Image: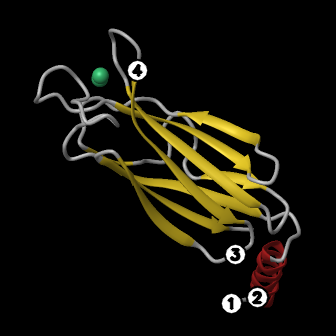
Amino acid sequence: MSRLLVAVFLASVVAVCSAQNSTTPTVMFKLERYSNPNNQLQDGSNCDPFGWSKCDPYVVVHVRNSANVTDLQTFTSTPTNDVSSLDFQMFIGFVNPLLIKVPKGTVVDLSVTIYDDDDIGQDEIIGTYWFLYVAGTEAKRETKTAGSASLTVMMATVG
Ligand SMILES: [Ca+2]
Ligand SMILES: [Ca+2]
């Protein structure tokens, strides 16, 4: 490595380190996986009228500051038709992971409601999942279950 490259490398290391000590860090929430092997709604009924029909899930995500319950941001994904499980990709109607800047120590409340998309009638709730993460703390991955479905989310402070 040339001396210049070393200098650039060290400068970027310093930049990353100081970012992690930032008083307004960036918090990351990555939706990882939805699983609903029984293809059921929150009330235990089938997602769609026919027993063999799988759900057509999409998510509505509210990111809140738990101290004052203000909505920091809300995101709605596009539906995926006829699946029992789903590994969330990067572009799902919004960019996944979500990146949000908040003051260090903020308890960020993530609530995710998963709906079954329906062409006829109102979309139905598969489940609502809550996650809490304190900005600036160690990364963690959690799986929450509601009804017959579960959702896995990765949470971290990235800068
Ligand atoms: Ca339905
Ligand atoms: Ca449906």
Question: Circle 2 is placed at which residue position?
Answer: 6
Q: Residues within 10 Å of mark 4 (few under 14, many from 20)?
A: some
- Three-letter amino acid code of the residue under disc 2: Val
Q: Is residue 23 above or below residue 113?
A: below
Q: Residues within 10 Å of mark 3 (few under 14, many from 20)?
A: few
Question: Circle 4 is placed at which residue position?
Answer: 123
Q: What is the quadrant of residue 60 in the picture? A: top right
Residue 118's x, y, as percent?
34, 18
Residue 147's x, y, as percent?
33, 45
Q: Is residue 8 above or below residue 90?
A: below
Tag 1–tag 2 contact (CB < 8 Å): yes
Image point (18%, 19%), residue name: 49
Q: Nearer the viewer, residue 40 or 52?
A: 40
Ligand 2 shows up in which quadrant of the image?
A: top left
Question: Circle 3 is placed at which residue position?
Answer: 137
Question: Circle 1 is placed at which residue position?
Answer: 1
Image point (41%, 48%), residue name: 88
Label 4: which secondary element: loop
Label 2: which secondary element: helix
Q: CA distance from mark 3 to mark 1?
A: 34 Å
Q: Describe residue 64's horizontal placement relative to residue 41 as left or right.
A: right
Q: CA distance from mark 3 to mark 4?
A: 36 Å
Q: CA distance from mark 1 to mark 4?
A: 57 Å
- Of tags 3 and 4, the one toward the viewer is 4
- Three-letter amino acid code of the residue under disc 4: Asp
Tag 1–tag 4 contact (CB < 8 Å): no
N-terminal of the pair, mark 3 or mark 2, is: 2
- Of tags 1 and 4, the one toward the viewer is 4
Q: Is residue 132 above or below residue 126?
A: below
